[in-house]
Amino acid sequence: MQRRKFIQLSAVGGAAISITGISCGQRSPASYDLLAKPIELAQICDLKTLREIGTSFRLQAPSEREGDKLVTLLLTDTDGDRVPAASDDLAIRYLISRKIRQDFETGHTVIVKGWILAVTEARQCALLVVKNP
């Protein structure tokens, strides 16, 4: 990756995270769409690829096909505690980012469509497919 492209992507990612922190409103259960946006993976994959990953993961993990199950798994922290749905966007983004990092550190990965992914990333792609069929 060229240095210029890397710097641009880093700036856009930082801006996106900052903007989400500005909103102090409460999350409604209908706004689970945030969970279905694999932000880090979307920097290197297009929407079609993300959807293909999600579809394939749902076939690989039939027990994680349903949206409610995926949301529960994504909102559960590494200690097994459920993060409240009313948490703000920044807290949810932090949780997901931390889970992805820990998935890689502990080897909690899966190979989907040739990609080595954190299970959390694969679940986000699966939820993307469920939420937007």
Image (spheres, rainbow, N blue to C red):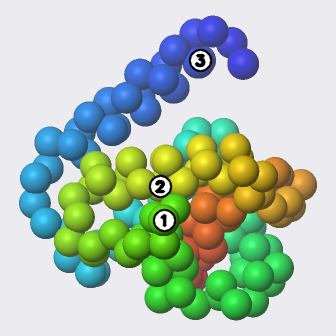
The reply, left or right, for residue 94 in relation to residue 9 is: left
Local crowd size for mark 1, using a 10 Å CA cut-off: few (<14), some (14–19), many (≥20) = few
- In primary-sequence order, the first of circles 1 and 2 is 1
> In the image, what residue type sits under mark 1?
Asp
Q: Secondary structure at mark 3?
A: helix
Q: Which mark is residue 111?
A: none
Q: Nearer the viewer, residue 3 or 124?
A: 124
Q: Secondary structure at mark 1?
A: loop
Q: Nearer the viewer, residue 101 or 8?
A: 101
Residue 35 location (% of width, % of height): 44, 65
Q: Which residue carries the number 2 mark? A: 96
> In the image, what residue type sits under mark 3?
Lys
Point out the residue furthest to the front here. 79
Q: CA separation, marks 1 and 2? A: 14 Å
Residue sitting at x 79%, y 74%: 56
Image quadrant occupied by the C terminus: bottom right
Point out the residue furthest to the right here. 114
Q: Nearer the viewer, residue 71 or 39?
A: 71
Q: CA separation, marks 2 and 3? A: 25 Å
- In primary-sequence order, the first of circles 1 and 3 is 3
Q: CA separation, marks 1 and 3? A: 37 Å
